[in-house]
Image (cartoon, rainbow, N blue to C red):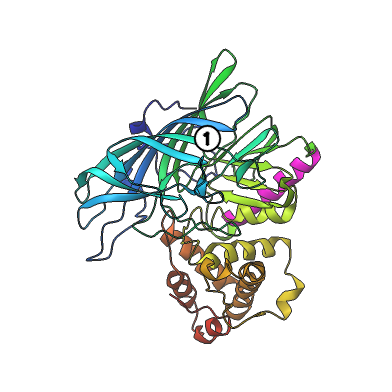
Amino acid sequence: MTVLHSLSALLLLAPITPASSPPETFRPAAASSHAAAASSPAGAPPVAQPVAYDVQLTSDATGARWDGRERIVLRNPGPGTMDHIWLRLWGNGVDGCTSTLDVTVSSFRGGIPGTPEVGCTAVRVTLSKPLPARRTADLSFALTIRVPERADRFGRVGAYAFLGNALPVPAIGDDLPPYVSGGESFQSVTASFLVSLNHPAAMAVPATGTVVSETRHHDRVTTRIAAPLVRDFAWAAGPFASVTGRTSTGVRLRTWYTGEVTPETATGVQSDVARTLEYGAREYGAYPYPEMDTVIGGFEGFQGMEYPNFVLTEPAALPAVHETAHQWWYALVGNDEYRNPWLDESLAQYTTDKLLGTPDYCATAPFWFDDGMRIDAGMDYYATHYDFYAPGIYGDGACMFLELETLIGADKMRTALRNYLARNRFGVAGPATLRNAFQAVTMVDLTPFWERWRNTAA
C-alpha cells in the first residue's frame, strides 16, 4: 500500500479505479477530476464545495471521547465571491443545546465562528478573507467529540463506539434543515478525506476508506486512513472481532462484530453484503472503491445506517442488504435526504426487494393513511407522522419502483438506473433528474404513473 504523507497527496487521489481487478494502491490523478458536486444557479449565492479534509484525532482509553483538529480545503465554484459557510455539527442533533455539547468546535483558523444554531447543529463561519470564484481557502478548527451512551448511528453501547455523522461538514449553501432521528437530514458533497486516529492498540477502528499506515507508540496506535471521493466519513471503535473476504468483483470485505455476534453470523452477513455489492455492480454500475467495511452489532432497536464504504447493521440480511444498497443510492448519487428521502431510501429498498423478494403488500400498494401522505413528502412531514415513514418511503416507495419495472420492462429499468448513476456519479441529484431518466428510456407517458404514486414534486 502507498503511504500518504500530506493532504496535497490526498488531493491527487482520483478517480478511483473500479474494483473489477482490485488496486492495492490509490491511483493519482488531478484534483479537477472531482465531479461537480455543488453549483450555483446564475444570480444565486455561491455554494461552498469542500475539496478535501485532513483530520487528526486522539481517543481516550474507551473511544468515548476524541480530541484533535479538522482542516477543510474549500473551493468556491462561483459565480460570486463567498464570505461565509455554515458548518453542520450533526452529532449534536439528538441532544441539542445541552450544557455539554456532544460535538464542539473552537480555535478557528481561516474563519470566525458564530453562535451554534438549529439545535446546535449549525455554526455560521465568516471567512477571514472573502473567497473569490474558482479559488480555494483553508478552514481549520479544534474538534472535540463526546460519544453519547445510546444505540444509534452516533452513540456508544458498552465497549463499542459508533461515530456516524460525527465529523463537521459544510452545509450546501445556506440550506439548514433540522436534525431528524427517525430518518436523515443529511446532504453533503463528494470530497477526499485523510484521517489519522490515535487510539489504544487493543481498539479496532473500522472506517470509511482504506488504511494506508499503522504506527505503534507503546500501547497506542495511529491509524492513517485515506478515503478519496466520498461524501462522508464514519468510523467505529472498540474490541471488535473480524472476518475478511472478497467479492467476485474484487472488493475487499472487512466485517467487524461485537461480542454478542457469533463468527458464523458475521460470515453470513458478509455474504449478504457481498451479493449486494455484486448485484449493484452488475445492474447499476461498478462499485468504485477497493474496500467495504461492515460493522455488526445488536444495537437494541437501531437497525443500521449507511456511509460510503462503511455500514452499521444488525446481524440480519434485511438491514445488511439495504444499507449496502445505499452505496449506490446516496454514497455515489447524493440527494437532499431531508426534502427527498425517497430518492435514496426507496431506491435502496427496491434493490433490497430485488435481492430478498417482493413483499406481499406490494399487491395492494400504494396505501395512504392521510391526504398528506406522499412518496415525495419530505422529513418535515414524516417527522410529525413518523408511523407513516416506513410504510410510505420504504414500503410504497419500493413497490412503486417494482411496478415501474413491470410497466416499462426490466431492461429499460436497468438502463435508466445505469444512466442515472453514470450521469450523476459523485454528484447530487434531484427528483426531476431521476424521473427524467426513466422517461428517457420509454415511449410510455409516465405522468399518470407518478401522479398515482403521489410523486410529482420537484
Magenta region, residue range: 264-281
Of residues 74 and 401, which is closer to you in this image?
74
Q: Quadrant of residue 428?
A: bottom left
Q: Residue 40, percent across and down?
A: 28, 61
In this view of the protein, can residue 206 be seen by the observer? yes
Amino acid under label 1?
Thr
In this view of the protein, can residue 445 be seen by the observer? no
Q: Quadrant of the C terminus?
A: bottom left
Judge from the rendering whether residue 379 lies leftward or rightward of residue 388; answer left or right: left
According to the picture, the residue beneath numbered tag 1 turns out to be: 210
Q: Is residue 274 magenta?
A: yes
Q: Residue 190, percent across and down?
A: 41, 49
Q: Residue 286, percent across and down?
A: 53, 52
Q: Quadrant of residue 390?
A: bottom right
Disc 1 crowd, CA 10 A, few/some/many (<14, 14-19, 20+): many
Q: Is residue 268 above or below residue 355?
A: above
User: Residue drawn at (38%, 60%), measured in percent from left and top?
Assistant: 175
User: Residue drawn at (58%, 51%), measured in percent from left and top?
Assistant: 306
Q: How many marks?
A: 1
User: Residue drawn at (36%, 48%), measured in percent from left and top?
Assistant: 34
Q: Quadrant of residue 364?
A: bottom right
Q: Secondary structure at mark 1?
A: strand
Of residues 359 and 444, which is closer to you in this image?
359
Q: Is residue 70 above or below residue 271?
A: above
Q: Residue 104, percent across and down?
A: 45, 39
Q: Is residue 332 above or below residue 358?
A: above
- Residue furthest front in the image: 99
